[in-house]
Structure formats: structure tokens, C-alpha cells
Image (cartoon, grey):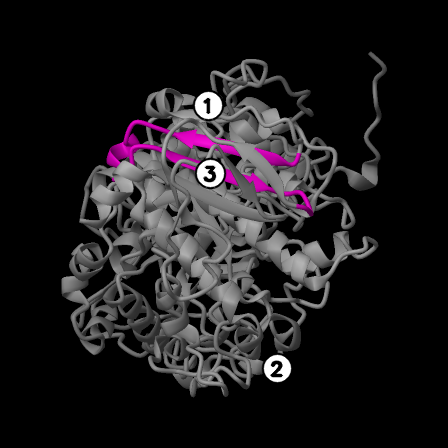
Amino acid sequence: MESRIIPEDKLDRVNIENEILYKSKLFSSSNYYTGNDLGLIYTPEKSIFKLWAPTAKLVTLNLYSKSNIDSHVQKNSPDRKVRMFKQNCQNSGIIENDTSYDDSFNYCNEITKGLWAVEVQEDLDGWYYTYSVKLPKDVSAYKIFLKQTDLKDPLDGLNYIKESLDTFDLNNIEFIEYEAMDPYAKICSVNGHYAAICDITKADQQVPGWEEDILRKVCKEKNPLSSPTDAIVYECHVRDMTMHPCSGVSRKGQYLGLTELNTKSPDGYSTGMDHICDLGVTHVQLQPIYDYDDVDETKPFDSYNWGYNPLNYNIPEGSYATKPDEPLNRIIELKTLIKSFHDQGIRVIMDVVYNHTFHTKSAEFNKIVPGYYYRMDKFGQFSNGSGCGNEIASERLMVRKYILDSVAYWINEYHIDGFRFDLMGLIDIETMKLIREMIDAIDPSIITYGEGWTCGDTPLVESMRSTRSNATHEGLINIGMFNDEIRDSLIGSVYDKFGLGFATSSKNINKEIFKILISGSIGHPSCKTICPRVRTPSQIINYAACHDNLCLWDKICLSTGKLDISDEERIKMDHLAMAIVLFSQGIPFIHEGEEILRTKKMDENSYKSGDIINAIDWTKKTDNFSTFTYYKNLIKFRKEHPALRMNDRQEIWRNIFFMNIENINAIGVVIDNHSNHDPFKTLLIFFNAEREEIEINLPEQDWTIVFCDLNTEEDDVNIPITNEKSIIIPALSTVVLADNESVKAYKK
């Protein structure tokens, strides 16, 4: 193999050397702190601060008065500095001011485990804090460790050509000090640069019924779910849902705006919370609500962002709060929003971005333990599988612990009902497995799913990635993944703006793949040449569009723009695509505004495009109320029929069959035997993507139409076709039939 010389200007030797230390079992095991008390523990009598910083020479607690903090950066001198001390972790619960470890560079210390702490015995309510971390400058922890231990090869036999350490003097190391936000902070200043100190439980007293909501009793009574496949997810952005001038909401773009009830558009149609409730979904997936960068919280409406740029993982975003400069305010208002959804029987899924941080070299993680929290490439540069300049090294024990602690915190403190993992492919399988096991121990009804891919190449070994290609791995069996295959098959690939799919009348359709997709991507006996994608239907999130790429209506319009086609036909294509999403096995997912034919003016990456593009235009509901009603009736029908929500692959294999329809753009699905205790013995579902009607022969039985494209009206449709041998399926439509005997019994 041809050797490659790495350019000197691209080589970061410190990062490369630190990688050797961090990847070693010795470092991992001796620095693994298992306590659940990192961060701040506040009482009126004292405050305890704990930070994991195994490579630090010294850590100092900086205390700031409110008048001394800056809203944009950490730049002022603290009012007070308090020295922190390495702790003897064998003396659990005791904070020691022990200086015996001061002169030690032992980065693999079983006694201290990298933990620093201090106890301040006074009431610090109303103060703010950061940490100053003193670290060696331009020299790796690896080199210091080798010099101090004087061991030739202490790190698990990892190969590395070591420079001579004979001239390296531990006493002549230059140090640099970084000021960092506490990564475990739960409350912060405006714009998130200083952690706040106060009694966080005071927030709960301001949200009526919050303590009782921990069991989600009202939500579970109104919205009982026996399986993840009972979920119907609606993705929305807090600001988008209420920001438009026609939303009828008074507190536009804020947490509290989305709690408002009885809000109307100028034409009297429901908006915001009422709109979501009326639609009938079971879950809302809120785009990032943790504290993110790029929106100035002192002027929140001067800029816009989706929020996929994490700043503080365990703190609510302040730009959605009415008073972001008051630390408890954002907590109170986010909890109020969650409680409001729960009161309506709707569960809340949190969109989390543990795969990367917004800042890279200057990120808080990196200022505390340089390089540890991030993967590096072979040059010692930050790897970029996220496309955002860095990626989190989830496989390292203390990074994994951080993610697990964070997920548990959001569940226990904010009563979150589910998690959507951004670029989940960058999170290792073992971490995702442990997250799911932890959640199951808390509340098995909490659902987890994510993007089963990466944005670019990553040093994480392919077999360890939580990707679609590894979905059948035992560790991922109860974790869902977005089904980009059904999305691209329905409306054309997102990488081809003009590409067509089944719903948009493409003539290049693989019906065998569609059979797999409709039956939950678990494989099907009639499609023996196509491998299963997942083990259970609850591992599949079926969708036609989401916040990324073109929204559904824009994609349909753009891809069919050169065809001789009317908007009426395009609307039927939209309806057909969503019918397939909602009538397929798996978990259906709807992106905000799809139900009123939302357009983003062909902007396929509107993450910072502002309200003019992103805000939901509620006048569209007037123009497209029949589409809203159709979506609503699709959801209603799915809820009424457990046969569409099976979560056992054996049951699917036994009870789902496909009719032999020659037309390439038509599919007939048979669901038989009262599947999943469905009230109807047999359902026949026909999807016709032809732009003309087709005739299909029926099995010899009496049938009733129980769903069709006439379901754009508020009233149910029930059209008997007794003793007919065939049926005409209108162009670009979905028709569902049930056996007459079951229909009659159902009506009684």
C-alpha cells in the first residue's frame, strides 16, 4: 500500500496524542465517574459544584452577580473566585478541600476519577457561575502521562511512534486557562453563557398540576397507547405554529403562544394548539427546545433558526420565553406548554441533537477536556460526520454518561414522552441501546427514534453506527428510524428535485419494494428477493416530508411542473401520499402544515430563512380546508382500525396479502382475520396512482366502501357496493373496503 505523508499544516499532534490516551481502557476505566450529581446541587444553606475534568491542572469556580454578566459573551471579571479540589471518590458524599493531588499529572487516577468539587456554605440564590479550567498549553495529556508514569507502552498495546521524552520537562509546562459554562447546568442567563444559581423547584409551583403530571395520568386517559405503532407524530416548530399575523395568537412565537386555546384565523378556522388537537395526532415532535445558539435572546424576533446548533443541552431555549433574562421564566413556560399538551391528551417528543455542538474548538466540552468529547480524523482535526464541523464521541464512557444523564433529566424534570435523535447514525449502537433500556425502566411508553444516517464520513466504525443498515441489530430493536425509502418512493428522491415517485405517477416503480414498505419494512413472504429493513414495525417512521428538504406540497409542485397537470391533480397526489403514510404499518409522521398544503416557496433548507418562509400561513387553511379534513379523516380511520397498527411481524406475515394488479401504478392490500383485534374481519385497501380511473376485480364477497376520497367532508362516508364483482378506483385516489358482515356488526 502506498504510504501517505500528512501535511504538517494539517496535523494536530496534541489531538492525535490525546486520542491515544482517551481511547485506552486504562483512561476510560480509571476516569469513569458514575455519580448522578455532576453540576450544581443548590440549597439555601449551601451550594455544591462538581465538574469532571481529568486533565485539568486546576479548576476555579467563578461567581458573578447579575449586574456583572454580559448577555453575549463571558468577558467580565468574576465578582468572586473559589478554588475547587480533586475529590476522593471513594468517600462518597463528602466534599474535601484536599490539596494532596495538586502536583499530580496522574490522568488515570482510580481515586479521583477526574472529579473536581467545592462546597460554598452560604445562600447563593441569584448568583451566576462559570468554571475556569487550567490546562497544559500545546502539549498533550498523553505525553505528560507517559513522562510521569515512565511506562513504555501503558495503553492497551495501541501502536504509536513515540517521540523521545528525554528532553521533556514536566516542570517547564506552560499553562492556559479557559472559562467554560457548566455542561450540566440546568438554568442559565440570557443567551446561555452563565449558569444560574437558584431553587429550580420554584418553577414547578408556578405550573398548576405539574407534580401530578409526572405520571401523565390525564394524557394517558385521553390518549391510551398500547404500542408505539399507535403513535401518530406531528412535527412542529414552536415559533412557526403561531408567528404568522393571521394566527390569532397573542404571544406569537413563544411557548405560551402555543398554549393558547380558541385561537382563530381571520376566517374563523382554528389555529395553533386547537388546530393540532382537531387534527387528531397523538404526539407532537417539537423541533429543538433546548438552549441553542444563533438567535439573540435579547432580540429574539430579529433572527430565526430551527435550533440544530446546541449550546446548553439541559436548558430550555430562551428565545421562546417571554422573559429570557429571568432564569426560571423559560422553565416555567416550557413546562406550561408541555402540561397544556398533556391536558389535551397529546404527548410531547423532544428533538435532540447529541451528535454535534454548534461551537467546536471553543465549545464548553472542549474547553474542559480538550478533544475528549469529539471524534478526530487521522490528521487530529475534528471529524465532520455531522456536516457542522464536529461530531460527538458517544462511544466514550463519560460522553455516553452525559447523553444518558441528559435524556433522563428531560424525562424526569420536563415529563418528555419521546425523543427524536438528529443524525442518530453518529451515535453508537451501545449508547442507543442503553438509552432505550434506561427509558424502559422509567416508562416504556416513551418512544425513541431518529435519523438512521450520517451527514458525512465518520471515524465511528460502520458496524457501531445506529444507521438504517444496522437496524436489525439486537441493540436497535426498540428504536425507530425515519423511512427515507418510503419518502423517496412516494414523491421522488430528495436529491432530485424533479424526480417523481409512486404518488406523483412515476412509471418507474418497483411494486415489490412498496409491498415491503406498506407491510412495515419487516419483509414479506410475497417478496422473498428483498431483505427486511427492520425487525418490528415500531422501528419504522413513515413520512413523505419533514423540516429538511422541500416540504411535501413544494416537492409535488416542482417535480410535476413540466407535466400537463392541474393543481387539483396535485392535491390528489398529496392526499394519496399521506394515505399511504397513514395506512402503512409502522409509525406515521406528519410535518407541520402538510395538512393545509404548506409552501415554503421552494426553499429546501429554511433553517434560518425567517418567518416569511417558515411561519405557518393560516389563510391556507381557508383555501385548503378539504385537505385538512382529509388528513383528519385519515388519522381518525387509522385510530379506529388496529389492523393498520400491528406491531408483531408474525401477525403481519399471517394477515397481510397483496392482490395481483397488473397496473404498475396501483396496489391492492388485503388485511385479514380481524388483525390486531380489528372490528373488521377483512380490509381491502387500494392505492391508485394512475391519472385515470382503473377497474379492479374483487374477491367473491359483499363489500362496503369505508373510506375513499369523498372523505374530504366532515361526515363519514359509507357506500355499499353489495354483490359487485369489480370496483372502479378513481384516478389518484385511495379506496378502502370492508366485508359487509363486519360493517353491519360494527354499526350495532
Q: Report the span colored magenta.
A: 665-692
Residue 297 versus residue 365 in the image, above or below: below
Q: Nearer the viewer, residue 165 or 286?
A: 286
Corner quadrant of residue 333: bottom left
Identify the element where label 2 is drawn.
Answer: helix
- Report which residue position mark 3 lands on: 685
- Looking at marks 3 and 1 on the same chain, the residue that comes earlier in the sequence is marked by 1
- Looking at marks 3 and 2 on the same chain, the residue that comes earlier in the sequence is marked by 2
Res 34 seen here: no
- Report which residue position mark 2 lands on: 302
Residue plotted at (43% across, 79% down): 324
Determine the CA span between mark 2 and mark 1.
45 Å
- Report which residue position mark 1 lands on: 472
Q: Nearer the viewer, residue 572 or 663?
A: 663
Residue 150: horizontal and vertical position, in percent? Answer: 52, 23
Residue plotted at (49% across, 25% down): 24
Query: Looking at the image, which residue sits at the far top?
Result: 1
